[in-house]
Image: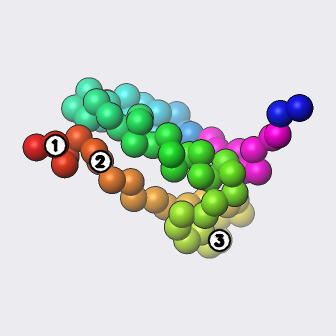
């Protein structure tokens, strides 16, 4: 039996479009996002929730591993 994620993580079409553009310059960006998305799915809250949205919305800053290589 597989367990369902505690939180469903959704990416907006705008986010996905901008991610695709950024991935051309920062090749590891998708790998940098994976651990944070998994943490959210498992119920971890890596940052403060943005109030007043009606949904559980979080603003996150994720370290870009591509910039540390230069």
Q: Position of residue 7 (x, y in %)?
A: 72, 50
- Residue pointed to by mark 1: 69
8 in the magenta segment? yes
Left or right of 68 in this view: 55: right
Compare marks 2 and 3 and give the one earlier in the sequence: 3
Q: Are marks 2 and 1 in contact (CB under 8 Å)?
A: no
Left or right of 34 in this view: 53: right
In terms of secondary structure, where does tag 3 sit? loop
Q: How is the image coloured?
A: rainbow
Residue beneath the point at 28% across and 30% down? 27
Q: Residue furthest right?
A: 1
Q: CA distance from mark 2 to mark 1?
A: 10 Å
Q: CA distance from mark 1 to mark 3?
A: 38 Å
Position of 49 relative to 9 (above/below): below
In terms of secondary structure, where does tag 2 sit? loop
Q: Residue furthest left?
A: 70
- Residue pointed to by mark 2: 64
Tag nearer the camera, 2 or 1: 1
Left or right of 36 in this view: 22: left
Tag nearer the camera, 1 or 3: 1
Q: Which residues are magenta?
A: 3-10
């Amino acid at each position: 039996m597989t367990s369902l994620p505690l939180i469903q993580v959704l990416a907006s079409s705008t986010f996905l479009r901008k991610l695709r553009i950024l991935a051309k310059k920062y090749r590891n960006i998708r790998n940098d996002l994976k651990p944070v998305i998994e943490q959210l799915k498992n119920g971890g809250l890596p940052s403060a929730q943005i109030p007043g949205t009606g949904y559980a919305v979080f603003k996150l800053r994720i370290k870009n591993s591509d910039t540390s290589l230069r």
